[in-house]
Image: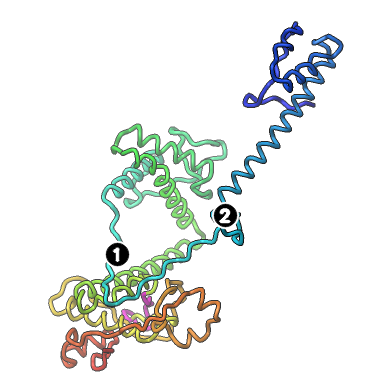
Amino acid sequence: MPRVIEASQPTAICVEGASEDTLAATEDPAQQAVMEEIYSVGGDSDSLASLTKLYNLIDRLLSKQDEMKKTIEQLQHSQSGTHCTSGDPTLNPYSSPPKPPQDPVWNQFVRCTLPAGRQARAARHTQILAAIREAMLKLLNIPSLKKGGTLPPPPPPAIRVPTRENFFLRWDETEKSPFNRIAGDILAQVMLESGAINLTTKEKENLPKMVQQHIRYLCRRYKNENRSDAEMFNTRRLKNCATDSRKRTLFETRMRVIDRFPVALGKHRQLMVHLGVAGTSSDEEDEENPQIFRIRRRRELSTRVAQLKSNLDFVYALYYKGPGSKGSQLHHRVPSELVATRPFSIAGLPITCLSRGWLSELSEAEKEFYRFQPHKYDYSFPQELFVQPNEARALARALSVNPDSPIL
């Protein structure tokens, strides 16, 4: 059975009564040979043999066209993946090695100015998110989730496609499923038509992505609320959130102390920024002694790094949590044998910031992978930031810091 001729492919047109003059007028010998082959079957252009021969010829042309198309695609693919120069034939012309990551510059005489901690969202971004939430609540016809509203059940099987009148989300699917993507497109179209918020061209392009992120959040929330162990799961989730919140607060207080004394403590900013929130030692509340938090130590880091962090905590308590200070009080954190297991950015650290015991367990390949820097870190801490031991002993006990022997 001959293949169907696509509109984009060349077609042959059979013209009745084609004369010898038409063939003679053809200037291209190859084209003339093809035309003669088509019309030279017993002098009858309408015969079945002529049509069969015509279809076979077209089928051969289409096969040639497919082969040429595949050859061109292979050439384009190989050219796009070739990044090496023709002067170096030893390199593989079909692949290029990835660029090596840029290691931080550990020059403690140059103050680090990189942003650290939580960065506030732009006010415009927050307004668009609020408009998305409001439009979603209207389409789902439910009150605000913060005011006691609950997500509706999934759509019945009879509803195959969401509409504005029957708007649903399939909670057991991802935000990229066909059903939920159609629902997201409806939500975005409703927002653009309502004009509740004026969007720029760039914001209109990013709107579908923001809608998908909100749908992903709602699907995850529905699954968490309808788990068989929802109460236990919610308790565990709130406990983890509280732990992460304490880590972020602790990291921000240390950065606040460093930024408060940029000349004296600016040399330590690069290390704190590189470790980040993930490199901050977490803690957990002691079940037998409430309000006492046991520190989870980082076994990869040197004890001098831990002492540097404790010194920053001690200075924060002296300058920001003295008598008459506002806000919540400091947590009572005590050392323990607990070890933090969450990953953090350790690649590129100075080798003097690492624990010797942990470093001895690494193979040569692992050391090469982490790219540790041969920089001798300066842990000096200005003694002038410490008050007299008699005045600070109570705070030192609360922070598990020995003010009599700070690392200088």
Q: Is residue 246 above or below residue 186?
A: below
> Residue 86 has which mark?
2
What's the magenta bit mostly, secondary-structure-wise?
Answer: loop
In percent of width and height, residue 339 lies at 44, 81
- Could you tell me how far apart the alpha carbons at marks 1 and 2 are, in whole angstroms? 42 Å
**Residue 160 visible, this orientation:** yes
Locate residue 331 relative to residue 156 in the image: left or right: left
Q: Is residue 49 above or below residue 130?
A: above
The residue that appears at 44% across and 54% down in the rendered structure is 221
- Name the one closer to the observer, 246 or 17: 17
Where disc 1 sits, the SS reads loop
In percent of width and height, residue 102 lies at 42, 67
> Residue 115 has which mark?
1
Q: Bounds of the magenta span?
A: 280-292
Residue 287 on the magenta span: yes
In percent of width and height, residue 100 lies at 47, 65
- Going by the numbered disc 1, the residue's amino acid type is Pro
Q: Tell me if mark 1 has few (under 14), some (14-19) or many (20+) residues whose alpha carbon lies within 10 angstroms of its own.
A: few
Label 1 or label 2, whichever comes before in sequence order: 2
Mark 1 vs mark 2: give the one in front.
2
- Going by the numbered disc 2, the residue's amino acid type is Ser
